[in-house]
Amino acid sequence: MLQAMNTGHDGSLTTVHANTPRDALARLETAALMANLNLPEKAIRQQMASAINIVIQVARMSDGTRHITHVTEITGMNEDIVSMQDIFLFEKRGVGLTGKVLGRFFATGVVPKFAERFKASGLQLPPNFFEHSVEI
């Protein structure tokens, strides 16, 4: 999968079961190591950092609904570690009288590196797009 994602063709999508975006990368790294490709861990991490732009984490809440909990950008490598930054997060604030999970989906205020690629592709986002908060 990582080799296919690194061929220079934009637009790949995959799923992995993990508890956090960081755990998702660890799961991918473990899967690559189990494939016996004889690649060092750093090379696998470099491929992930090069191929993956964003991790979207979805979690099932206590009321059975699913919410996006993280939109996290992969920003590159810092020594041997894949660098990440959260762009949007979901904060659970409690449970309503009907048992529905209450919370907010909010922007962290970080403008992602991919915003420039959007602009270069002709996709214009509102100036305050990465500053919004939505109550659920």
Image (tube, rainbow, N blue to C red):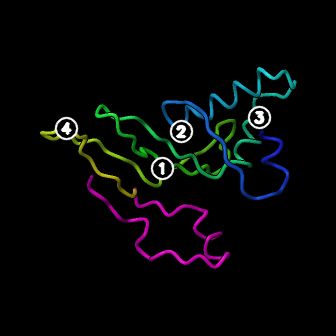
Q: Of callouts 1 and 2, which one flags the residue occurring earlier in the amino acid sequence?
A: 2
Residue tagged 4: 95
Please state which of residues 81 and 123 is positioned toward the viewer in this rendering.
123
Mark 4: few, some, or many residues within 10 Å (few <14, many ≥20)? few
Q: Nearer the viewer, residue 59 or 110?
A: 59
| Amino acid beneath label 2 | Pro
Extent of the magenta region: 108-136
Can residue 117 be found in the magenta stretch?
yes
Label 1 – label 4 distance at C-alpha: 25 Å
Q: Using a 10 Å C-alpha cutoff, classify the residue at mark 2 as few (fewer than 14 neighbours), some (14 to 19) or many (20 or more).
A: many
- Check residue 66 for magenta coloring: no
Residue position marked by numbered label 3 in the rendering: 44
Label 4 vs label 3, nearer the camera: 4
Identify which residue is drawn at 70% across, 45% down. Answer: 49
Where 123 falls versus 109 (above or below)? Answer: below
| Distance between the alpha carbons at the discs numbered 4 and 2 | 25 Å
- Look at 19% across and 38% down and name the residue there: 95
Where 22 sits versus 124, above or below? Answer: above
Q: Do the residues labelled 1 and 2 touch (CB within 8 Å)?
A: yes
Nearer the N terminus, badge 2 or badge 3? Answer: 2
CA–CA distance between discs 3 and 1? 22 Å
Type of residue at label 4? Val
Q: Which of marks 1 and 2 is in front?
A: 2
Q: Which of marks 2 and 3 is in front?
A: 2
Q: Do the residues labelled 2 and 3 touch (CB within 8 Å)?
A: no
Residue 64 in the image: x percent, y percent? Answer: 34, 34
Q: Tell which circle, 4 or 3, labels the residue nearer the N-terminal end.
A: 3
**Labels 4 and 2 touching (C-beta < 8 A):** no
**Circle 2 residue:** 21
Query: Cα distance, mark 4 to mark 3?
Result: 41 Å
